[in-house]
Amino acid sequence: MVVDGQILLGTVALEPNRWGTVDPSGGPIAKVGDWVDAVASAGFDGLELWERHLDDDALEPSMLDAPLPIAVFNTYVGFDDPDPTQRRAAAGRVERARSRAVKFNVGNDPDAADRYARRLAEWIGELPDGVAALCECHHGISIAEDPDVAAALFNAAGSPEQVQAIVHTHED
């Protein structure tokens, strides 16, 4: 789990192409490895790393041995697809990054809540021991924006130590 009081830098916040406005592919432009030493010198305790900043091809030893741990891995893996291949791949990246938590979103289909809960439970079982799954409860992005739905989903998927919520208090 992430230690209370740590200050993490979320790399997605610094990505100029996170919405695909620079390059329509949506691929990252920022090279995290180029500025991780400066971020460490600035006093940050670790990184919340956007998945696209550490894809399978870029899982380089220099990032894994950087002066800042990848405390939280931020994935946009889907829960609509019944095929678990992409979720398993994301769990593998979390393990290789040695993260203590992983941020995710469930889908936005209210009729799929039971399927999301089952797939989330399966995915949590794929994560390394002790890694917390942190659901971003975004307005308009996920059925977990409704606290009652989120509670039911999380209770069905795992223990409070395994699955938790990050609640965004603004709509846009």
Image (tube, rainbow, N blue to C red):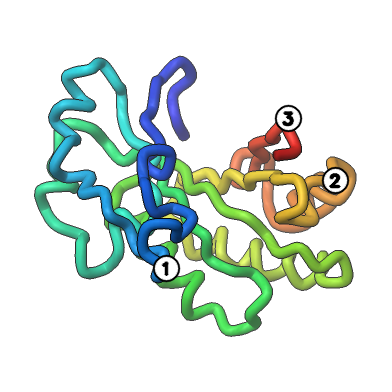
The residue to which callout 3 is attached is: 169
Badge 2 crowding class, 10 Å Cα cut-off, few under 14, some 14 to 19, many 20 or more, is few
Depth check, front residue: 24 or 56:
24
User: From this viewpoint, which residue is outermost toward the front?
Assistant: 22
Mark 2 vs mark 3: which is more N-terminal? Answer: 2
Q: Secondary structure at mark 3?
A: loop
Q: Secondary structure at mark 2?
A: loop
> Tag 1: residue type?
Pro
Mark 1 vs mark 3: which is more N-terminal? Answer: 1
The residue to which callout 1 is attached is: 24
Instruction: Answer with the quarter of the image where residue 93 lies.
Output: bottom left
Distance in Å between CA atoms under marks 1 and 3:
29 Å
Q: Residue at x 76, y 63 (%)?
A: 108
The residue to which callout 2 is attached is: 146
Residue 10 in the image: state x and y as whole percent: 40, 36
Q: Which mark is residue 7?
A: none
| Residue 53 left/right relative to 3 | left
